[in-house]
Image (spheres, rainbow, N blue to C red):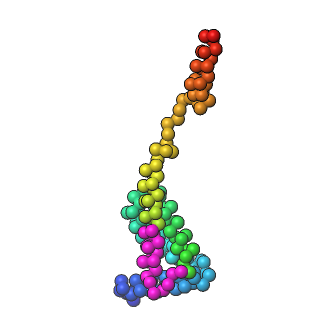
Amino acid sequence: MCYKSIRQRKEAVTTDLEERIKQVQAGQTASYEAIVEHFTPPLYRYCLRMINQAQETEDAVQDILIKAYESIGQYQQNVSFSAWLFAIAYRHCLNLLRRRKLQMKFSWLFHREVYESSAEQVYDNKILSPLQRMNTCN
């Protein structure tokens, strides 16, 4: 039996990922699947700690992986891919939190009470009723 150390296994995974990244950059989009499978669990954990909502985290991870795919041509091999990917994740989650804070700040604008009377009924009651009373008094 041949046992590999943890370090050797990590290096093998890193080498495989680097090769997959080069393939994706060369246009072999099917290679991105291995990258997605490798990074989805740690991205999910990272984003969940920031966002703290499971459904929103799932959506965020999908968006992050799409953003990374769309800009993988800009990735340079002299930087760790995981650092590059997690920088995208950080900025994406930060933008979500900012948007959430802004929505909370202005939520009162969008959650007004439903009025029992329509605008037309209010108009009739406030303007036409006094006019009708004036006409009946004459």
- The x, y position of residue 82, in whole percent, is 44, 77
Q: How many marks?
A: 0
Residue sitting at x 50%, y 61%:
59
Q: Which residue is outermost to the bottom?
A: 2
Q: Judge from the rendering whether residue 38 lies leftward or rightward of residue 134; answer left or right.
A: left
- The x, y position of residue 110, in whole percent, is 51, 45
- Relative vertical location of residue 111 with respect to residue 133 in this rendering, above or below: below
- Relative vertical location of residue 116 with respect to residue 78 in this rendering, above or below: above
Depth check: 79 or 124 in front? 124
Residue sitting at x 60%, y 84%:
26
- The x, y position of residue 122, in whole percent, is 57, 28
Membership of 103 in magenta stretch: no
Q: Judge from the rendering whether residue 13 lies leftward or rightward of residue 116; answer left or right.
A: left
Depth check: 27 or 95 in front? 95
Q: Which residue is outermost to the front?
A: 138
- Relative vertical location of residue 46 with respect to residue 55 in this rendering, above or below: below
Residue sitting at x 43%, y 59%:
97
Residue 91, visible in the rendered structure: yes
Membership of 88 in magenta stretch: yes
- The x, y position of residue 34, in whole percent, is 52, 76
Residue 33, visible in the rendered structure: no
Q: Judge from the rendering whether residue 27 lies leftward or rightward of residue 57; answer left or right.
A: right
- Write down the region rendered in magenta: 74-91
- Relative vertical location of residue 107 with respect to residue 129 in this rendering, above or below: below
* Quadrant where the N terminus is found in the figure: bottom left
Main SS of residues in magenta: helix
* Quadrant where the C terminus is found in the figure: top right
Depth check: 30 or 124 in front? 124
